[in-house]
Image: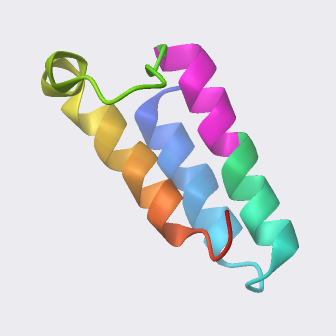
Amino acid sequence: MSSLVKLHEEYEQIMRSPAGEARDRALGQLMSRMEREYHIPALHTPEWEKEHRPVIALYRKLSMSRTSL
């Protein structure tokens, strides 16, 4: 399992690349990896989010950084 620190470092590296499809794709791949590794539920689950605040905070940061969905 990747540490949140490592994932955040990867996020910072991705954000240094030019905005566009490639960056959005890399962010999406990182989000998918987080979903698998941290078992992020597909539906909003307040209980899960309360127990995993640092994970969901980084996940949302990734999501908000994407320019297209």
Q: Is residue 62 above or below residue 34?
A: below
Q: Which residues are magenta?
A: 30-38
Residue found 66% across the figure and 65% down from its top = 13
- The stretch drawn in magenta includes residue 59: no
Quadrant including the N terminus: top right
Q: Quadrant of residue 20?
A: bottom right
- Residue 44 lies, in percent from the top left, at 31, 30
Residue 49 is left or right of residue 30, and the answer is left
Residue found 60% across the figure and 68% down from its top = 66
Residue found 46% across the figure and 66% down from its top = 64
- The stretch drawn in magenta includes residue 36: yes
Q: Is residue 26 above or below residue 49?
A: below
Query: Is residue 26 something one can see in this rendering?
Result: yes
- Residue 55 lies, in percent from the top left, at 35, 33
Q: Is residue 24 above or below residue 50?
A: below
Q: Quadrant of residue 36?
A: top right
- Residue 54 lies, in percent from the top left, at 26, 37
Q: How is the image coloured?
A: rainbow
- Residue 57 lies, in percent from the top left, at 30, 46
Q: Nearer the viewer, residue 33 or 40?
A: 40
Q: Quadrant of residue 23?
A: bottom right
